[in-house]
Amino acid sequence: MSHLISLQAGVANIAEDAWQFVALPPSQQEVRKQAGKVVLFKLTGEQTVTPEQIAGTLIPANGKVLVPLTVFIARKTELQARLDQQEVGVWLDTHESLTDLNQAQADLNALPIIAVHVERFADGRIFSLGTLLRSRYGFKNELRAVGDVLRDQLFFLKRSGFNSFAMRTDRSATEAIASLNDFSQPYQGAVDEARPAFRRYNR
Amino acid sequence: MYKYDEIDQSLVDERVAQYRDQTKRYLAGELSDEEFRPLRLQNGLYIQRHAPMLRIAVPYGMLSSKQLHKLADIASQYDKAYGHFSTRQNMQLNWPLLEDVPDILAELAKVEMHAIQTSGNCIRNITTDQFAGVAPDEVVDPRAMAEVMRQWSTFHPEFALLPRKFKIAVSGTKQDRAIVQAHDIGMEFYLDAQQQLAIKVWVGGGLGRTPILGTVIREHLEWQHALTYCEAIVRVYNLHGRRDNAYKARIKILVKALGIDEFKRQVEDEWAHLKDAPNTITEAELARVAQHFEPMPYEVLAQHDASYDAATASNPAFAAWAKRSLHAHKIPGYRAVTLSLKTHGQAPGDASSEQMHAVADLAAQYSFGELRVSHEQNLILADVKLSDAFALWEKARAQGLASPNVGLLTDIICCPGGDFCSLANAKSIPIAQAIQMQFDNLDYLHDIGELELNISGCMNACGHHHIGHIGILGIDKDGSEWYQVTLGGSQGNQASLGTVIGPSFSAEEMPQVVEKLISVYLSERNGEERFIDTVRRLGIAPFKAHVYADKNAAKAEGIA
């Protein structure tokens, strides 16, 4: 069963995923360790993808593909025809830069989908990236959260402009839908409702 | 104080339901420890040494009698009939059961209270001056803006999972009592040249492992932009703050790494996009919230009260208490009164359910049914008639709430420490109690005069030891507990961080160490000079020499 929640016009449903997620091949570099622990977070702006990984990424020849930002930037010419057919989307990690994306693709709305990959659910950069994509870059198409996406972050993801959620597959996506509406009257303005409570109601 | 409307109430009610479900899923094994952790923390629930600890929000320190009665009842029903008031003006329960927390939250919601964002990597309770609204040196009552900011920060979706905790303080007085310079964001309200409400914004202060005082990022911000400007700051932090190392994840580290000029440039770039967005505060909203903080219906009274003057003249115990516990008030004939939670030998900041009920009754009888929690961990009745002071004192004394030590050495600011907290390296409460017993002579205590002594059980600095005139930090050396002493820290406009005087001491040595520091002060002070001023004038050298004299002598003998 699909673990994708799709939110359209305020209604959430489990949807089939039309997109093939294209992952980078594993890096040959050693995992960085600090005090014996694997460092899970990459810092903003850090370059973590090697040219070999980009070149070695296998992109399916047919159908809709969701490709990593670094691959999209390096191999855009190769993808251009499929991009024109609305068959290419881009995903980025939370430490990657929206400026890089925007430089490679001036009109983001040519992309039918952008996904933000969150390696660990506690990485709140995903909320700022969603907010910026919607409010600063004017992105109007599908905005998807992928990776360690859990039910208890859904409300915040929704408010930050996401309308599609690839839930972690070991959890029930059907049950998670309820958490999109944990709160009915949020105080502050955000992407989904720009007006704070004091502008929505005569308090 | 602020009263909930249906929007406020629906939010806390929905929070109870949400957390009840999260707890249920955790207990059913559907949420891992790691996944549940940020959820319970953002509801103030720590897993501690003996039991969970629940931190209940007291927004900017304001409580009603009704709320305090409820806290007392909750402490009786779900805990060991006492609570601990913290340096962030909140209240903590040390022994609740994890399974009971949803019910506790439901009880709190009935009196417009909650535990939202009292811990975790999010925007925490906004703190301010405990004398807000009544202090004679106040330029702007900061509480309406504090409430507007509380609402904005509650479940702010973009800032739900920051790199680390984020603390905001606001202040509207000439003499800062909210330690705005020791916060991630400090907002100092003032009236500008056009007599308009404006904000001086500080950023990047904080205590903890790496104590740093904040830097001014903007001298003049019109009040309407308080929220959008904070959004710009927190967004830059959220995107660029370090997440690979919890010890380097506070905004102060980012500000230092980038430099204030570059940090400010990035914030101002963000703000250029956010300025005038719908989160800009409207006149109507500020006015709506401000009406909850209108002045109390004060009586017209004379500056002096004959019965009060007579009582102080004839009763030295009352006079000693009044001298320390009564604070100036904007309105003639009124005083703000501090009820000390620092009875010698008692854990600083602790109050029993019985005491809480008593304070709630005193507030109802003498202070318009409201009270405040101070970051010095005492309770304040802000609007007491001078003519009621004696009766209040008698009743407070009967409850053990009238120690005449407010602002003195034994008014110790202290975290729960190793007795309760799983983060602590060392115990702090027994140190506080030993020092209080060492200085149990009231005349001596009053002679020493104003002195702030702060104790933290670890470098997270919940006891704000860096800004104590005398600061004591519990450290762990090879599995045993030691205490490092700093001198010369201070809160207020002249905020400063203390300097470590030398090698650390054992718990048994601590009362004598403080005694020696005091003896240097008493022999060196000029006239009425306060302890902190003597330290500033002389530096730490003479204090250090005296404290370590015996140790050095012993060492020298050992060598010979």
Image (cartoon, coloured by chain):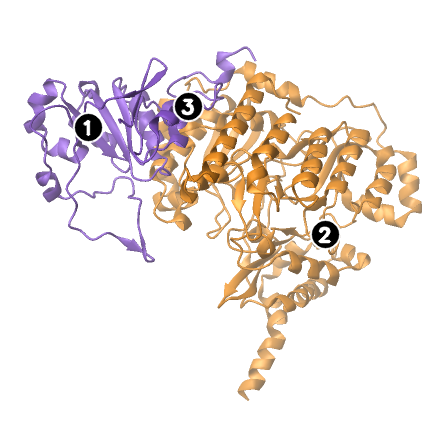
Chain colours: A purple, B orange
For disc 2, the marked residue is: B408
B550 or B506: which is nearer to us?
B506
For disc 3, the marked residue is: A178
For disc 1, the marked residue is: A90
Q: Is residue B501 left or right of residue B132?
A: left
Q: Is residue B318 above or below residue B478?
A: above
Q: Is residue B545 above or below residue B122?
A: below
* Residue B442, x across and y down, in percent: 80, 56
* Residue A105, x across and y down, in percent: 17, 25
B255 or B242: which is nearer to us?
B242
Question: Is residue B312 at all visible to an observer of this figure?
Answer: yes
Q: What secondary structure is found at the residue carrying circle 1?
A: strand
Q: Of discs 2 and 1, which sits in the foreground?
A: 1
Q: Of discs 3 and 2, which sits in the foreground?
A: 3
* Residue B24, x across and y down, in percent: 49, 35
- The numbered mark 2 sits on a residue in which chain? B
Q: Of discs 3 and 1, which sits in the foreground?
A: 3
N-terminal-most mark, 3 or 1: 1
**Quarter in which the C terminus of chain B is drawn:** bottom right
Which amino acid does the dot numbered 3 rest on?
Ala
Disc 2 crowd, CA 10 A, few/some/many (<14, 14-19, 20+): some
- The numbered mark 1 sits on a residue in which chain? A
Report, in whole angstroms, how far the alpha carbon at label 2 lies from the one at label 1.
63 Å
Which amino acid does the dot numbered 1 rest on?
Val
